[in-house]
Amino acid sequence: RIFFSINQSAKIILFGGISAKSDFNKGYDLLMQCFTNIYQDNIELVIFGEKKNNETYINGFKITNIGYLNDEESLAMLYSSADLVIVPSRQESFSQVCLESISCGTPVVAFDYSGPRDIIQHQTNGYLAKPYDPKDLAIGIEWILQSLSKSNELSLKAREIAIEKFDIKKVAQSHIELYNRILLN
């Protein structure tokens, strides 16, 4: 957090990706609606993947805009500095942000739809909200923050599931098996 000048005592919610605020499908408007339903104090929204701007507060919550990150080490440090990552996308083919987040042991709140559904196990390594419901996103954020205040189990499960399901050797082997099944038919 020191490296990115992020508040060390705040609960950090990370949001981002390339054009995350300007691409309608990324759900920035849904995220802003979600923040009108959060009642915890000392939360900071950290945004990455966008040009830096002058926004400093939205709905009473501090915003820190990191800008673009070009290397894996910085991305991993940023994911690891957050308490949770939020992916309010209307549509994701896979959701690289979800996978990168759980690979760093950071739980994710996302909609129970499209790509995130394949990565997030509800209330195991994150929270899957009702599709396009900003109130349920807020419930997911509060649920994760309360869970993390009790134990580190969500973070441990996030990393465990990333290794178990998405290790490059396991993914490559499943592709080989698929190709072999296709060739046999």
Image (spheres, rainbow, N blue to C red):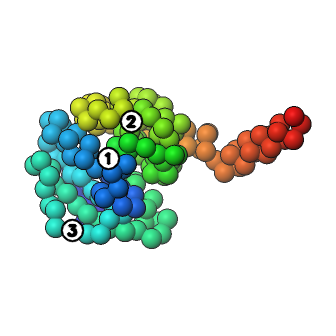
* Helix, strand or loop under label 1: loop
- Horizontal and vertical percent for residue 63? 20, 57
- Counting labels gives 3
Q: Which mark is residue 111?
A: 2
Q: Are marks 2 and 1 in contact (CB under 8 Å)?
A: yes
Disc 1 marks a residue whose amino acid type is Gly
Residue 174 in sight in this render: yes
Task: Write down the quadrant of residue 23 in the picture.
Answer: bottom left
Q: Label 3 belongs to which residue?
A: 53
Compare residues 134 and 45 and report the one nearer the observer.
134
Residue 157 in sight in this render: no
The answer to whether 146 appears left or right of 74 in the picture is: left
Q: Nearer the viewer, mark 1 or mark 3?
A: 1
Q: Label 1 belongs to which residue?
A: 27
Seen in the picture, residue 123 relative to 165 is either above or below; the reply is above
Task: Write down the quadrant of residue 64 in the picture.
Answer: bottom left
Upstream in sequence: badge 2 or badge 3: 3
